[in-house]
Image: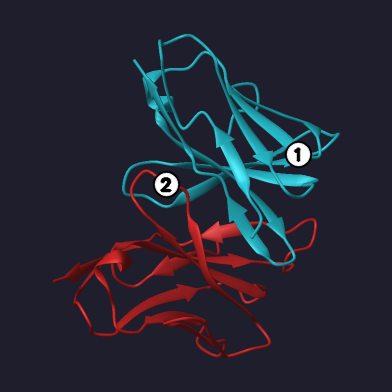
Amino acid sequence: GENVGLHLPTLSVQEGDNSIINCAYSNSASDYFIWYKQESGKGPQFIIDIRSNMDKRQGQRVTVLLNKTVKHLSLQIAATQPGDSAVYFCAENIGYTGANSKLTFGKGITLSVRP
Amino acid sequence: GAVVSQHPSWVICKSGTSVKIECRSLDFQATTMFWYRQFPKQSLMLMATSNEGSKATYEQGVEKDKFLINHASLTLSTLTVTSAHPEDSSFYICSAILRRGAFFGQGTRLTVV
């Protein structure tokens, strides 16, 4: 079946460097994508989202890029900080946020920030 | 942002007993909520969609008689794990999707001993 997957299980970066976390999705009908951050023992925390009619969206220190041609999603974190260490999930949704929509999560990648 | 509150945050129960987990939307009404299960170092797996005033919709492979979902009001959905066994030990998370995004509860760590 169609699924959302991540290329790398772990990512280690130096504090202050930029981080790029990648995600591949296979459901061409997905029209809404979200990146979440999850710290140990906590629920997912919303980071940034993007609709399929966009290819880039920026937030505070984070940027999400969407390439529908190759079904690829990425999260860029600028000036990575120790507090960014967590597991990151991409999630896709069909039907945006309508009543029948639901999220499907990717496998998750652990971001480890070296001091 | 919207707040989804989940209770309890952790629970330990004996094998064979039932456990109820509550999910509340604090500043909005949610006609639909979602229940996920997450095993260690794995992603969130959707278990079921909770619909206010009607039966829940379960994902394939999820036993509806074991994971009872009740969504009796627009601000409360409950998940009851019946006759819990050690293999049901997991992290259970609820969420609601609004037009401005999806919001998650804090999660409930269930340990069955």
Front residue of B11 and A24: B11
Q: Marks 2 and 1: in contact by CB < 8 Å? A: no
Q: Check disc 2 and give the amino acid type.
A: Lys
Where residue A103 appears, x then y in whole percent?
Answer: 61, 58
Horizontally, is B84 left or right of A114 in the view?
Answer: right
Chain identity of mark 1: B
Chain identity of mark 2: A
Where residue B103 appears, x then y in whole percent?
Answer: 61, 55
Where residue B43 appears, x then y in whole percent?
Answer: 42, 52
User: Which chain is cyan in the rendering?
Assistant: B
Q: Check disc 1 and give the amino acid type.
A: Thr
Residue at figure coordinates x 65%, y 28% from the top left: B64
Q: Are marks 1 and 2 on the same chain?
A: no
Task: Give the colour chain A carries in the figure.
Answer: red
**Residue hosting label 1:** B75
Looking at the image, which residue sits at the far right? B53
Horizontally, is A34 left or right of B77 in the view?
Answer: left
